[in-house]
Image (spheres, rainbow, N blue to C red):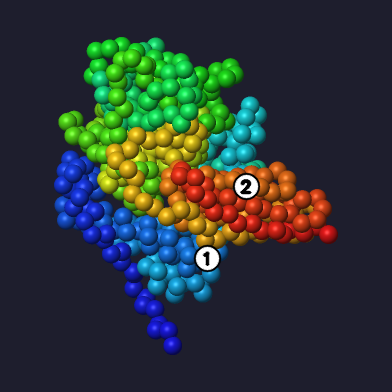
Amino acid sequence: DRPRPGTGPVLLEPTPGVGKKVATSSPKLLEAVQRDMRLSRAQAITRLGRQDAAGAVESRARRAAGRSFAGAWLNGDGSSLMVAVTDQRVAPAVRAAGGNPKLVAHRRGELEIARLKLRAHNDKTSGKTSGKATGTVVRGWHIDLARNRVVVQAAPGKQAAAARWVAAAGVPAGLVAYDTGQAPLKAAADVRGGDSFTNSFSKRKCTAGFTVKPLLNVDVLGTDGFITAGHCVDKGNFVDLDDSLIPGVGRTNQSPFPLPGTPPVNSQTQLRDRAFVQFNPGLGTQALPTARSGLFTTIPIVGSQAAGVGSVVCSYGRSSGYRCGPLLSTFQDVIVDLRDDIDNRGSPTILDVHTARFCSSPGDSGGPVITPEGQAQGTVVGSNCTGVGLTSVYQPINRSMNDLQVRLKLAGARPPTPGPVITSFNCYSDGDDENALFTCELYWTGGTDPKQVQVSSNGRWLRKIDNSDYNYYVFAGNCAPFGSTYARVTVVDDDGRRDEDSNPSVCNLS
């Protein structure tokens, strides 16, 4: 007989050497982790080792949970990996894999579709009276894996109005929780991540994120450059590096600004806040594969593997230096106040940002967010450094690279990794008639970042949610009007390796 599983927490076994390597190679960064997380040196080293071990444990737990897997996150002190499951019967297998199962009511796909409905409602109500709720009543929304709910950030005293806005979006009340009280978010030579620069036109001061190379000659420049926050620069703007005597060392190749249409921008304007600045040729500017870890120290950038919820991430900005804290949530849509003393860029809804518990100051926008091990995470968008929370949001780097068609400059060759392997592809429909809806959830392991998913289906009105950073993808649509509705998926990693799966009969209208 199989032995009865224990009931105590399953602790993560730290990956040997990871924390000590950070302490040796980036002592200033480890000091920031100790300071901001209120840890001793030994505790910080242990936490980083456990954080590194969590990835492999999650992969095993995801396989063990199968179709009932609903997300994973590190607990408060980073000692254990919590795993949400929708079926208690898989709990023993999840524990055996090293995770701590938590029974939840809702599939991850249910929550993702609810989040998509809120985004669509925000977009649909643009310019209408009901759309004014966003910003004044609702300040953002995201999925909280631990609570197994879509959490809507409501302005103080506005929860009832926020609930009416959610109901109008067609989201069931049982899928939603509300948070109130948080202040609005505000935009916060050789080149490396963390270097400061100035927009030559507007004189706005920001921080460079990560140095990158273009996949194609996306402009006549064809040179390397860096990623930063989109609100720092308009397309075509030149930038000056603050520690360079040569003006106009780079030009903004891609940015969501200036926005089309008539100002002012409002909360129904939805965008991703990232930009690509290319170096002007002939000036000898080099893109170094590092990020600042102090005024005179750097850390090598070794990849872009996304940190899990609860992991420690750190950011370097021209105003704040290094700040570190736990990753609180992922893929949040949030209204950010981009108004400052230079101009009024309004308060658009920034899509798919991650939230971490550290403070950023004006001038830190665009700066790099990394793990202490040197994995690139994203670029700073904005921060709330008043009231409850002290949080910053950042745009994830892998999505930015795919959107901007660039790739990170890395310090050395990437270590070998297995290609993507699909571990679960499940589809659900709510009926077999012409009005039936279906949802498909895809999980996989392995693959080099950034990864992409290709979807093929004869279903109608497909809506897709790309969480490839965490090896997860969901899409939904209406069943085909006759016959069987099929769905095919292909996961492709950055080295061109792929895995495929299909469901020949998601729903069947005979």
Helix, strand or loop status at disc 1: helix
Asked if 135 appears above or below 285 in the picture, the reply is below
**Looking at the picture, how far across and down is residue 399, in whole percent?**
47, 38
The numbered dot on residue 455 is 2
How many numbered badges does the structure rendering display? 2
Amino acid beneath label 2: Val
**Looking at the picture, how far across and down is residue 171, in whole percent?**
62, 49
**Looking at the picture, how far across and down is residue 447, in whole percent?**
45, 51
Asked if 135 appears above or below 354 in the picture, the reply is above
Helix, strand or loop status at disc 2: strand
Q: Is residue 39 left or right of residue 458?
A: left
Question: Would you name the residue on which mark 1 appears?
Answer: 66
**Looking at the picture, how far across and down is residue 466, in whole percent?**
54, 45
Q: Earlier in the sequence, mark 1 or mark 2?
A: 1
Locate residue 55: give its quadrant.
bottom left
> What's the residue at 49%, 72% (across, down)?
90
Compute the Cα span from label 1 to label 2: 21 Å
